[in-house]
Amino acid sequence: MSDKVLIPGEYVGPGEVYEESSSTHLEGDDIYASTVGVANESEGKFNAKADKPPIKPGEIVYGSVLLVMDSFAIVLISPPEKNGKIPAAPPEGKIPVRAMSSGFTPSTRDAIRVGDIIRAKVVKIEGEKAELSMVDPNLGVIKAFCSQCREPLDKTSKGLVCKNGHRERREIANDYRAYGKIML
Ligand SMILES: [Zn+2]
């Protein structure tokens, strides 16, 4: 009997076969997965997958900005799916203000704001967090939203402007809103 990899919400098996755990939930008499994990019928267990997302220093990652403080920002990294494995929990990345631009950034909020989509390079992994850098013309914000009205900001000759005319600053990547063939 081979192990089955399941994603959250998938049916694991009947409650009389599987033990409940923090990785599962019970619906009626049946056990369902709450995390990505492996169901082992012979042991009667569903184990959360220990695999960490395949993120290494030097890799380019995408993420959305969760929090912006005076000296750093926290980003939720969208981990690449590799070999069909879905990471159990996307890690967070931290971008120090000095890694937001190759020039001087007077304020983190001139570079990045909550909800922006960014492309960054992994500098190092520290525990559950990756330290990220946007210092490269190809790195930075690839889609930003107006902090006043939440409309996307367009790149214009006057800088980034939303359809309601609000103008804001960001450290944008050179392909802002034109990533590959996809218009963001
Ligand atoms: Zn606006």
Image (cartoon, rainbow, N blue to C red):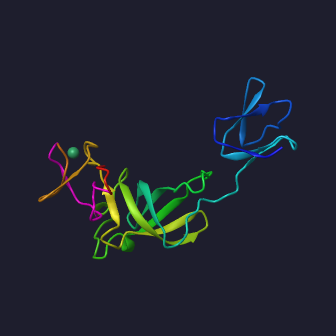
Which residue is outermost to the left?
157
Q: Main secondary structure of the magenta part?
A: loop
Residue 81, quarter of the rendered image: bottom right
Residue 164, how many percent across, how many down? 16, 42
Tell me the residue at 33%/73% (across/down).
136
In the figure, is residue 102 to the left or right of 11? left
Location of the N terminus (image quadrant) = top right
Q: Which quadrant of the figure has residue 61?
A: bottom left
Question: Quarter-wise, where is residue 26 in the image?
Answer: top right
Foreground residue among 179 and 29 = 179
Is residue 158 rendered to the left or right of residue 69? left
The one of 13 and 155 positioned closer to us in this rendering: 13
Query: In the figure, is residue 145 to the left or right of 20?
Result: left
First to last magenta residue range:
164-179
Task: Tell me residue 174's x, y (percent).
Answer: 27, 65
113 and 81: which is toward the camera: 81
